[in-house]
Amino acid sequence: MQPKVADQPQPGEQTPAALDKAYYAALYKDELLDNILPFWVQHSKDEKYGGYFTCLNRDGSVFDTDKFMWLQGREVWCFSHMFNKIAPRQEWLDMALHGAAFMEKYGRDENGNWYFSLNQQGKPLVQAYNIFSDCFAAMGFASLDKAAPSDRFKEIALTTFDNILRRQENSKGSYNKAYPGTRPLKSFSLPMILCNLSLEMEHLLGADKVSAFIPTVLHEVMDVFYQPDKKLIVENVFANGHFSDSFDGRLVNPGHGIEAMWFIMDLARRLQDPTLLRKACDIMLYTLEYGWDQQYGGILYFKDILGHPPQQLEWDQKLWWVHVEALIALAKGYVFTGDKRCAEWFLKVHDYTWQHFRDAAYGEWFGYLDRQGQVLLPLKGGKWKGAFHVPRALYQVYSTFEKQ
């Protein structure tokens, strides 16, 4: 797919004069409405036991019936969000309610924490060790409450959010396999998610509570995990916030850093803070340049901040979510700041992503490529990929371009 720029560069100009926002808004909206959402409506609904199938082959057929709570919550959010933001289509609301009913009936343990996975019938398979099951349950039920207001949905979302805050310092609890005390690390993933989750739940939490909450997550993301000497965000730091020269402490996930920066850009807009907005955009662009594979194109999955070999054997894979999150961040960066570097990078990442991940033959997008850009797994969903990153990205890009 060829990049489309409204005006050709003038002599001596190094960047496109303007990205054709209307063209890309229409392209991304059509892809969402005509390809992605219909794929999940057609293939993911378990009509017999409730909830969603996420382990889908290339053609949408089911290859495994286990149900992962974080993907169930994400799909509830997806269809609720589209109902709320695009159009009140009954089909989308029915999909969201279908998944929520299964989650409500089977998804939590006796303490209100969400299991990681269930079998098809709803019996627990993996204990509630993963706090991200809770994060996306809260997000899903909060969005569903907008679509179909219910005291029950509100209560589930708010109780879950309170549990997240209660568990955040030791999210895995008794399931934490790290030996206590030797190298106490904390992870970037949770404060990153809380940046976005707090905004998603603002109608339930209230503006005052969110406003009071924001400085804490901003500090964690922008002061604790961000390493100013390297201009990068690391995945883990010591509990006191200091850098850890270890495999985990040196780990950089470019996709996480980029995704977090569009969350921060949204917060900066809410706070009307142009300095924060500019800083987030700059970090995003630097992280993208750092993570870009100069040999084969695409964004690498993991890197070591000191240049050592990463411990992850999949470090050089190209993943769907990393690339679509970059597209969101670049669209927002361009529209919010006018930085022409964002336009240049958007065209570059768009071309790579649409050429390599989009499946023109069977619909939806592939998730996993090797370093050279060849499809590693033909699946459209599994334990980690569901109806979330691709539809959210398509919505975010088109709405960002369309509303400006």
Image (tube, grey):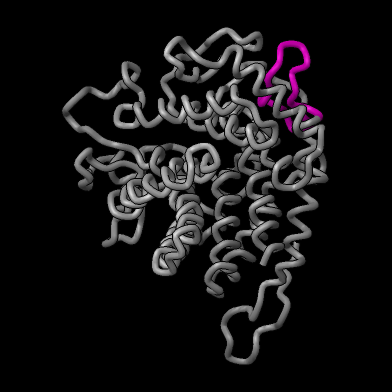
Q: Is residue 56 left or right of residue 278?
A: right
State the image quarter where residue 53 is shown: top right
Which residues are drawn in magenta? 42-60
Q: Where does the image place residue 152, in percent across and percent down from the top left? A: 59, 22
Q: Residue at x 36, y 42 (%)?
A: 188
* Tally of marks: 0
Q: Where does the image place residue 64, in percent across and percent down from the top left? A: 66, 18
Q: Is residue 103 magenta?
A: no
Q: Which residue is drawn at 22% across and 22% down?
A: 179
**Residue nearest the viewer, comparing 4 with 246:** 4
Q: Is residue 46 magenta?
A: yes
Q: Which residue is drawn at 26% across and 35% down?
A: 185
**Is residue 118 in view from this perspective?**
yes
**Residue nearest the viewer, comparing 159 with 34:** 159
Against 179, is 376 above or below? below
Q: Is residue 60 left or right of residue 197?
A: right
**Is residue 289 in view from this perspective?**
no
